Amino acid sequence: MAELETFREATRAWLEENCPSGARGPGPIPNGSTKIEITDTDTRVWLERMIEKGWTVPSWPTEYGGGGLSKDEYLVLLEEMRRLSARPPLWSFGTSMIGPTLLELGSEPQKSTHLPRIARAEVEWCQGYSEPGSGSDLASLRTRAEDRGDHFVINGQKTWTSGAHNADWMFILVRTDPDAPKHEGISFLLLPMDQPGVTVKPIRLISGDSPFNETFFDNAIAQKADLVGELNKGWTVGKRLLQHERSGIEALVSGSTADAESGLVRAAKRSLGEASGRISDAAYRDQVLAYEMNNHVFRLAQRRAVEESDGGTPGPVTSIFKVYGSELQQTYYDLMTKIRGVQGFGAGRDGFDEADLETTRQWLFYRASSIYSGSNEIQRNIIAKRVLGLPD
């Protein structure tokens, strides 16, 4: 315990000295894409300093650009970042999804090639899973990869590809044996996005944003060295990656931006008024309080899962995080829109400022949170079978 307290003191002092004021509280968080310029000076400085420290991925081994922190040290770092309201220096599909998967299941060349670049914020990834007609039934995917000796030739289509327009690389599930049963004959590949055989077309959403894309492959190339795991055994790799995605563990880092009074509470006080420091409207006060308590308990459950898994990602229990976390997100934005009254449902510039419009966009966007990463209905089936052990 004495060593951990020494680490805490040193970490607190380093953060105080090195975290710029502009990197504390809400603000931009880089994802490592080479196609997105970091224009905010404090955000860039914070990222550079954390890269040097190895704290963009604190628990990764130092040989791959991480901080090499133990589970307990990692949790101390998060607590000290929370104390300063320090933003995560980096948040990406690389740090939360493909990076942890490669640490577990990748070859040594794959680790040494890709992980340091992720840690240094030199690359962003996107996920090639869903297809037209193969969403929740992911194993029915039809995108083909033909073995050409030292490389694969890929043809097909993916949809709802988050961030593909800014991504440098994709991790993708492809069918390499069309005659095998549905959950077999699938392989997990890595491929660069900037090549002639890859075409990305943004999908415009009802919110007005286009974070998702259709991605088309016309003789796209993935090197044989970028096959993760065994040929035709990619379903196992793909499922493990989804557990990393659904765990929400990286939200523990984002939680470090929270201060004593949340954005929801502040919004409620501004819109509904306050008396003696409390939200004036008793009914809304109860709803906000219920959300805050549930969210706090959820974060504690995530932290406990990290502690019990020795710092790694839990197994099927991540489906619980996915269900509960997505419904919490929807509750948050339901409340944010309702407490703002008509200003919470802005659809045009007349009479609405940017904060009003952003609230509406987020409310619309998070309607999908119970669908993406595996629908909540499917997650409840996983919980019943794999966590509770109930019969089919």
Image (tube, rainbow, N blue to C red):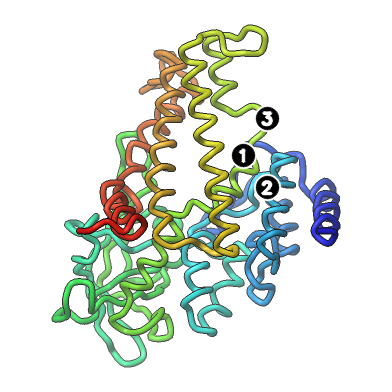
The percent coordinates of residue 86 (x first, y second) are: 70, 43
Q: Is residue 111 above or below residue 24?
A: below
Q: Residue at x 41, y 30 (%)?
A: 331
Residue at the spot of label 1: 27
Q: Residue at x 38, y 86 (%)?
A: 224
Residue 330: quarter of image: top left
- Disc 1 to disc 3, how far (Cα)? 17 Å
Instruction: Check disc 2 and give the amino acid type.
Output: Thr
- Disc 2 to disc 1, how far (Cα)? 8 Å
Position of residue 173 in the picture relative to residue 42 (left or right): left
Q: Residue at x 47, y 66 (%)?
A: 98
Instruction: Check disc 1 and give the amino acid type.
Output: Gly
Q: Dot 1, how many residues are within 10 Å of its Cα: few (below 14), some (14-19), or many (20+)?
A: some
Q: Dot 2, how many residues are within 10 Å of its Cα: few (below 14), some (14-19), or many (20+)?
A: many
Name the foreground residue: 310 vs 351. Answer: 310
Q: Earlier in the sequence, mark 3 or mark 2?
A: 2
Location of the N terminus by quadrant is: bottom right
Residue at the spot of label 3: 260
The percent coordinates of residue 281 (x first, y second) are: 51, 9
Q: What SS does tag 3 mark?
A: loop
Residue at the spot of label 2: 43
Q: Earlier in the sequence, mark 1 or mark 3?
A: 1
Instruction: Check disc 3 and give the amino acid type.
Output: Ala
